[in-house]
Amino acid sequence: MTQKYDIQAMNCASCVASIEKTLKKLPGVSDSRINLIEKRLEVDFDPDTISGDEIAQALTTAGYPPIKHQDHVEEILEIEGMYCSACSARVTKVLGRLDGVDHAEVNDLTGKARVVYDPAMVGRREFRQKIEAAGYKLLDPVTVPRVKVKTTIFTPEIVTVIVLSALLLLLAMGPMIGLPLPGIIDPDVSPVNHVILQLLLLAPVVYIGRSFYTTGFRTLFQGAPNMDSLIAIGTSAAILYSLYNTVLIFQGAHHHVHHLYYETAATIIALIKVGKTLEDLSKRRTTLAIEKLMDLTPQTATLLVDGEQRTIATDEIRQDDVLLVRPGESVPVDGVIIKGLSAIDESMLTGESLPVEKTIDSNVFSGTINQTGAFEMKATSVGKDTLLSKIVKVVEDAQMKKAPIARLADIISGYFVPVVIVIAIVSAIVWYLFQQDLPFSLQILISVLVIACPCALGLATPTAIMVGTGRAAAHGILIKSGEALEKAHSIEQIVFDKTGTLTEGKPVVTDFINRSDYPTDQLLDLASSLERLSEHPISKSITDYHTAKLPVEDFVNTLGLGVSGRLDDHQVKLGNDKLIPAAADLPATYKAQIHMEVDGEFVATFEIADPLKPDSISAIARLHELGIETIMLTGDRQEVADALAKEVGIDRVIAEVLPTEKAGEIEKIKQSGKVVAMVGDGINDSPALVTADVGIAMGSGADIAIESADIVLVKGSLTKVSDAIALSKATIRNIKQNLFWAFIYNVLGIPVAAGVWYALGGQLLDPMIAALAMSLSSVSVVTNALRLRTIKLKGV
């Protein structure tokens, strides 16, 4: 069983390490996945051994109270025809009885009902049926454009802490820099008033930053301190020392007014709150790609019932509904066109910029944009079954899974905060022993605690993976995990399945050779009419090449040889050289040959080939530019495979391989020790895709096999193979940059804060400067990850 939780107290890599440590101790918990950016936790557990409530209690005890993540939604329904409390009670009852409805309440005065429900089980259509059956009417939704909530750093809390901290800083430091204060609050004239005002200014700042203390001390007492613990200890030390001096001031020792550090505590809280807000805003930008995908689905659609048009909510649509899509509208769900034709922009799913022509029986996909003509479509996949929903799910899952490169940061984060606390205490004690100066030692303690930044370490990997996978998804490349992303950057060999990957996957007639005196059109009429009765793919290629419908008698389909029959007073045969021995002496070619005999005379030959995809040659060339060896795996004869490989530029050929032998061939290739990728259709090549280090599936619309590979290319071009590798290389490079700077920041910053630089003749680091540096370090890591949004992909 899997349960999702939202954990707002999870802020840094140390938090992640603590949560993972807590979960590993619980019996029945088999696995967990954490998304630090979304503050989301997924736990796999055995419900017979442990319950979700017990897991939640363990997390709460550890200092990370979880909120069960609900996939349920809340909707307000407008209902017409309710006039009294009996009406509202009736509607409440019929809605509450529906499976999937958690809660329903109705207000007959406003004519509105609030329903909390699971959209996977029930929806607006079921609500309409029950409400109308009860004698009332559910009003159709009014289309309201989605309004993006404007996020800003200047929230009321942030403005308050900035203003109060600035005033407190001015009050404490003003006299030192020559700014005179009124006598009533001057520290030398009225020290008691001065300290009371400082306390009044500090109190709201501490309250606004209370989460640092509640979470920080709780995790500290649980033996798993995090970044909040560092802030809590550092600022508490400053406040407690200042309170000690405040008591002395009230007792008459007024000179202690110059030993207050309230402004230090307030400024640290303010700077870190500002830094965290900036960090959160930056982190939200890393999820923009997914948000854009989710926003593609229109809110409403036009349902056709007996020729009548009706506007309904998109989540009311059910399979087999007939919908009207006008020019400029987005397709609401996946379906097939049953009337009309159009050109549709599918760039948001595939990354291909050119519109795709659509006719009757063409598949259309949710979120794509109808550009030209109106058409009617039948819904085939709705809700979570649409291609768009699957893409969003894959990317969200990928962002929950860690890359192996993150393991070092995870290990360090588990020990980071306790080590920093020890360094801070030892440094303060050593300096006190040397200096006999308590304020100086306190400054060392606070600076070390505040400058240490486990957040930068924790954000280095997930932010880059989130931006990288989101960027890829926007261009039709689904990277299913951080591990796949990391492996892809090391690919040295790529094995391509031939049919449907390098080639179009369906045979076409390339040449017709007339070897007789019969008119070509007459032979083509005879051949097409006869092949029309066969279902073989090669027969279809001949009927596509030329269409005729002469009546056929005595039709015979001989398995493995060909077809024969009588038509237009001629006995006609079409097949291989075993059916028509006169063709046996023809020279071999890499194309398939279908020979034709009329009344016993060998008269013609069809040459048939599976043509290369238009971009196969350029895709292979780009992989060679990346230094990757290319291999083709096929069941074709060696000479046929060699000819095709030479045309496309493939380095090595492995031919005459049965479908069941492909995985074994991949194993042999892997024995060289190189990182091997396999590119196939994702349906017939599943064993080989799983065997390869990286499986890459070429998706095709509704038939996309998302579960079959590590990376899925949604429709589009074969050049996306190199795009996926290039994006992987850029993302891993970005992660390494982030980890390097996060490590360097802490390796250099902590010794400076501990007074090493001061001991060598430099300046002592002020705790407020340390807090600013810590805040900026996290923001810089996220900002660096956001650069991936601008990477240029050649195939896009």
Image (spheres, helix red, strand yellow):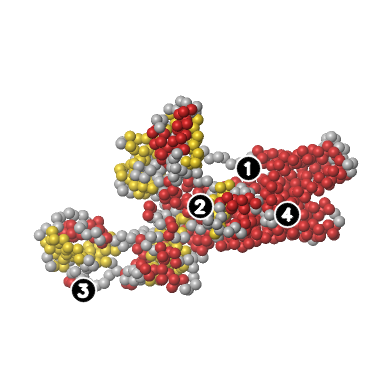
Q: Residue 585's mark?
A: 3
Q: Nearer the viewer, residue 727 or 249?
A: 249
Q: CA distance from mark 4 to mark 1?
A: 25 Å
Q: Residue 449's mark?
A: 4
Q: CA distance from mark 1 to mark 3?
A: 81 Å
- The amino acid on which the numbered mark 1 sits, given as a three-letter code, is Ile
Q: Nearer the viewer, residue 202 or 580?
A: 202
Which secondary structure lies at badge 4? helix
Local crowd at mark 1 within 10 Å, few (<14), some, or many (≥20)? some
Q: Which residue is mark 1?
A: 153
- Say which of marks 1 and 3 sits in front: 1
Badge 4 or badge 1: first in the primary sequence: 1
Q: CA distance from mark 2 to mark 1?
A: 26 Å
Residue for point 43% across, 69% down:
666
Which secondary structure lies at badge 3? loop
Badge 3 or badge 4: first in the primary sequence: 4
Which secondary structure lies at badge 1? loop
Q: CA distance from mark 3 to mark 4?
A: 87 Å
Which secondary structure lies at badge 2? helix
- The amino acid on which the numbered mark 3 sits, given as a three-letter code, is Asp
Badge 2 or badge 3: first in the primary sequence: 2
Q: Residue 59's mark?
A: none
Local crowd at mark 3 within 10 Å, few (<14), some, or many (≥20)? few
- Say which of marks 4 and 1 sits in front: 4
Local crowd at mark 4 within 10 Å, few (<14), some, or many (≥20)? many
Would residue 39 be seen by someone viewing this image from the given angle?
no
Residue for point 41% across, 71% down:
664
- Rendered position, 348 above or below 306: below
Q: Which residue is mark 2?
A: 396
